[in-house]
Amino acid sequence: MSPHHSALLLRSSASANRPRMSVSGSKPREMSLNWLAELRRAATLMMQPEKRIAKPPTVRRSIQAIFFASWLNALLVFIPISWAMNFALPDQHTPTFVFTFLAIIPLTKLLAFATDELSLRVGQTLAGLLNATLGNAVELIVSIIALAKCQLTIVQSSLVGSILSNLLLVLGMCFFAGGLRFSEQGFGQSAVQLNSSLLTISVIAVLLPGAFHMALQGQPEYDELSTDYNILKTSHGVAIILLFIYASYLVFQLCSHKALYDDVNEDMQPTKGYAGQNPFRLHRRRRVITDGENVLSPSSTHDREAAATLSHPTDPNPDVEPGTHSIASVETEIQPLMNLAVCFWLLAVVTVLTTVTAVFLVDSIDGLTSSGSINKEFVGIILLPIVGHAADHVIEVTVSVKDKLTLSLGVAVGSSIQIALFVIPFIVTLGWIMNKPLTLLFDPLESIVMFLSVLTVNYVVQDGKSNWLEGMILMCAYMILAITFWYYPGTQGIFPNC
């Protein structure tokens, strides 16, 4: 055989043994590339603002906007006062608590101001996530500090109180304020029902450790110490699952079902104005519109918007909910109040000031409650959530009066979901890392109240509409809880000492 033929045979055998690229093998690669492209496109849409952003102001203008952002900035004077009180009079716990309480309120407002400026530069869904996340920053800071100081009761009660204040107080105020101007306000029913399901899952995770503990009590083989550690291990496992659920919820909200959380979708219920005279407004004149229905002759800006609800059932502007007529719809761009660099600096400075002030706040709680005039349950359930959300409550109510109820629901209910599915399991996991025995076994009354609150809100929002009476019901329910926890002494946890 000639060398040429030998070379041909070797070449043919090598080509026969060489692995061939099949068409079916390229399909997974194409699918992965398509998935990455879709993910990149979704991220681009999330980062794209709803309207064009105008030229940002200078640093000097940005700092002026910070100082004149709100009248609550006058309370910033309590920051040095509270710090001086903590170091100069360390035994005066009640004044220290009051001054630190007042000092954190304007810091929360500045945090919300910086968050709003960041939200202008991203899409609507990501803006809602930013508002819910940074809106819970104060609760997260207070919880981490209390956890480090082994204040486990304060950690649990403050987190439950944040959920209750968002679901009952804030949501009730939004429904009530909007109902004074509109007969019925509509919102996306499917998204709210899904959020209710997520809150129900979190309530189940809180109730199960209590059922675990009660089921074994009185049994002959019951060992309290081993049962407590089993509950601790169970809490660690459940916390990991809740974090996975929250991650899945983020993918659902930001990527796969982003349109479900938009202002305009098929599921949106229409907003209706009052037929005839609005009973909550005086000195109005009647007029007859084309279809013969008696409505009010508007004499203010808010009344003109309410009349537009009846005359303009649909609105082409996706930033305004159906039934509203916003002046912003004719604007081509939005003028930010701060440039991006100043915004990030404000976030950093406010976070540091809030952390230091929250340390003094947590340190003063034991001295405040030792006199017996006020208990830790009331401080955690009622007072601490007010510190973290006082400024946000006013903003959400104002937005609901403008018939942007979906945005109010997204912040209030979304904030509750974030606390229930992220902050609580994250704090439990962090306690696991820090060797702090924080469990999901909450106080029995706190667990029952949380379950009943989620159940009540689920019944209220299931029809996709709201009115002022539903808002008053939620607010009265929160006042009932406030009175109850004022007199409730609380129970000792399974790990009272770290």
Image (cartoon, rainbow, N blue to C red):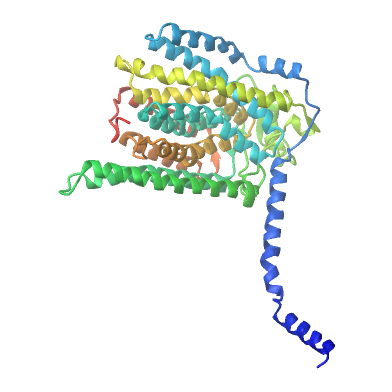
For image coordinates 52% across by 48% down, the residue present is 194
- Where is residue 188? Give x, y as percent: 59, 44
For image coordinates 42% across by 25% down, the residue present is 382
- Where is residue 23? Give x, y as percent: 71, 74
Of 177 and 95, the residue lying toward us: 95
In this rendering, would 209 be left or right of 399? left
Of 47 and 164, the residue lying toward us: 47
Number of marks: 0
Residue 222 position (above or below residue 474): below
Q: Give the position of the N terminus as an image quadrant.
A: bottom right
- Where is residue 498? Give x, y as percent: 33, 31
Q: Quadrant of residue 328?
A: top right
Residue 126 in sight in this render: yes
- Where is residue 400? Give x, y as percent: 60, 31
Of 317 and 494, the residue lying toward us: 494
Residue 465 position (above or below residue 471): below
Q: Quadrant of residue 394?
A: top right
Residue 483 in sight in this render: no
Which residue occupies the extreme top position in the image? 88
Q: Quadrant of residue 175?
A: top right
For image coordinates 80% across by 29% down, the residue present is 54
Which residue occupies the extreme left position in the image? 220
Residue 263 position (above or below residue 492): below
In this rendering, would 47 be left or right of 230? right
In this rendering, would 286 be left or right of 223? right
